[in-house]
Amino acid sequence: MLPALLGATGILALLTVVPGPDMAIVTRQAVTRGRGDGLRTVAGIAVGLLIWGALTVAGLAALLAASAEVYLVVKLAGAAYLCWLGIRCLRGPAPEPGTEPAAVPTEDQQEAGGGGGAWRTGLVANVLNPKIAVFYTGLLPTLAPPGLRPATGMALLVVIHVLLTLVWLGTYVYVLSRARRFFARPRVRRALDRTTGVVLIGFGVRVATA
């Protein structure tokens, strides 16, 4: 069982580090709002994965993947949300020259500002991603370690996937936070907002047309 579990973990790790909408959202949150909101966004993404994992183990995600009508609704909702996030990035207020010190909030400002919005952003983006349902229902059963009940094996793989996501995106947020001064420059911020906006809209269109 152990070799199969290690092999499944390796596959999940490779899929975790592939850039996608989650990384784009985390990038903007961490750079524009600071490390605290970046980590809260990662936490929201992890909760979204747990929700999909629970639905998969219960067999509900398979029903979604098999129902063209329901899948279409979730797919279009997820695509619309990604496009909305992208438009917000494109329309976000660009910092004026001379405002570099305030471009990125301090740690104290981050704590004072709460962070529920960042958590919800990560959660909603993941819950409205129907590809996770297809991924979990199509791939996890084939990776489930032998010797365990199918539901138990898939639940174990979901937990591993969530932990890998937390470690990977959490480390990514920490690396970004170390470069806050660079990203605080007005020109860099404007370029980041525009790039992230285009990327998110592109992911949205891709989800809608897939």
Image (tube, rainbow, N blue to C red):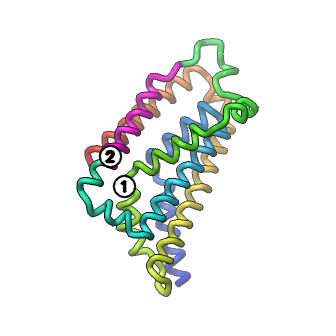
Could you tell me residue 1's position as x and y percent?
52, 84
**Quick one: which residue is furthest to the right in this view?**
108
Residue ID for mark 1: 131
Label 1 crowding class (10 Å Cα cut-off): few <14, some 14-19, many 20+? some
The amino acid sitting under disc 1 is Lys
Residue ID for mark 2: 207
Number of on-image labels: 2
Could you tell me residue 209's position as x and y percent?
26, 45
Could you tell me residue 67's position as x and y percent?
26, 60
The picture quadrant where one finds residue 135 is bottom left
In the image, the segment drawn in magenta is: 74-93
Q: What element carries label 2?
A: helix
Image height of 143 relative to 44, above or below? below
Relative depth, front residue between 141 and 71: 71
Q: Which is more N-terminal, label 1 or label 2? A: 1
Label 2 crowding class (10 Å Cα cut-off): few <14, some 14-19, many 20+? some
Q: Which residue is rendered at x = 52% and y = 69% of the image?
A: 9
Q: Circles 2 and 1: CB distance less than 8 Å?
A: yes
Query: Label for residue 203?
Result: none
Q: Which residue is rendered at x = 41% and y = 37% of the image?
A: 199
**Quick one: which residue is furthest to the bottom in this view?**
147
Q: Which residue is rendered at x = 57% and y = 43% of the image?
A: 119
> Marks 2 and 1, how far apart in space?
8 Å
Relative depth, front residue between 180 and 63: 63
Decide whether residue 78 is among the magenta residues.
yes
The answer to whether 59 appears left or right of 147 in the picture is left
The amino acid sitting under disc 2 is Val
Q: Is mark 1 on a helix, strand or loop?
A: helix
Q: Main secondary structure of the magenta part?
A: helix
